[in-house]
Image: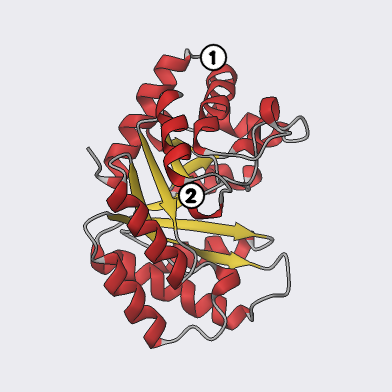
Amino acid sequence: MIDSHTHLGSCRQDDAELVAAAVAAGVTRMLTVGTDGASCREALAQAERFPQVYAAVGRHPNEATGFDDGDLAELEALAAHERCVAIGETGLDFYRDRTPPADQQRAFEAQIELARRTGKPLVIHTRAADDPTIETLASEAEGVTVILHCFSMPGRLDECLAHGWYISFAGNVTYPRSEDLAAAAARVPEDRLLVETDAPYLTPQVVRKQRNQPAYVVHTARFVAERRGVSYEDLEAVVERNARAVFGWD
């Protein structure tokens, strides 16, 4: 199994303990994601330390205040690291009034272009911003491999699939109130499907009283497999194949 999106640096446990627990659960590869300069450097260091870990470098929309050419140059330098396999997470987040929309948009478009220049996939965060996120990707990201992390737009699934974007489900797909997400997870074509934890957030329902960690992606994967009417082993093969194609890891 793989975890296509986690934040090792935000988890309370020691990195080695987290990776060991994931491996014990059958998780062979995980992508740890940076959201600003410091966390991107930490993610790359973690990827250097553990062969199971790879890194994504980006500027989260809530960290995009004042984003400028210097910030982009920093990201470009970090993206050149051999253990960096993706750009992001980036996108738009209008749920909280933390970052000016114009700054978010500027950072978003810059990272789309960085993904295009580097040939790396683009990891998307969107919250309370479905329309502008889809519009920006549709107009600016042609030819870029796009991953909709922690998929949250079940009503727009067909539109997202028509663009060829990858759909990644986190632990919230398992929540009783998330029937619309669960139904979407059942419909995504095999070659567009990924699973993730977004740890330490969005712990799957069966272990929801605990803090999330990469090992718990297996719970989300089991839920998705059940909703799709396939075995866990079949789903495991599907998402491992997709992650290898997207991220280029061994």
At x 54%, y 42%, the residue is 158
Report the front residue among 1 and 51: 51
Numbered disc 2: secondary structure: helix
* Looking at the image, residue 69 lies above or below residue 189: below
179 up-or-down from 114: above or below:
above
In three-dimensional space, the C-alpha distance between marks 1 and 2, rounded to whole angstroms, equals 31 Å
Q: Which residue is drawn at 43% across and 24% down?
A: 24
Image check: 146 left or right of 246? right
**Residue 224 pos. (x, y %):** 56, 25
Q: Which amino acid does label 1 sit on?
A: Gly
Residue 16 higher or lower than 90, as above or below: above
Classify the position of the N terminus by image quarter: top left
From the viewer's perspective, tell me whether residue 105 is left or right of residue 84. right
Question: Which numbered circle lies on residue 21?
Answer: none
Say left or right for 240 vs 36: left
The reply to whether dot 1 and dot 2 touch (C-beta < 8 Å) is no
Quadrant of the rendering where the C terminus is positioned: top left
Crowding around mark 1 (Cα neighbors within 10 Å: few <14, some 14 to 19, many 20+) is few
Measured from the top left, where is residue 47 in percent x and y?
A: 32, 51
| On screen, residue 86 above or below 152 | below
Residue type pointed to by label 2:
Leu
Q: Quadrant of residue 183?
A: top right
Numbered mark located on residue 8 in the image:
2
Horizontal and vertical percent position of residue 51: 27, 41
Mark toward the start of the polypeptide (1 vs 2): 2
> What colour scheme does the image use?
secondary structure
- Give the residue number, with chain letter if any, for mark 1: 229
- Residue 115, picture quadrant: bottom left
Determine the secondary structure under disc 1.
Answer: loop
Q: Residue at horizontal 45%, vertical 61%?
A: 34
Q: How many labels were placed on the picture? A: 2
Residue closer to the observer: 67 or 208: 208
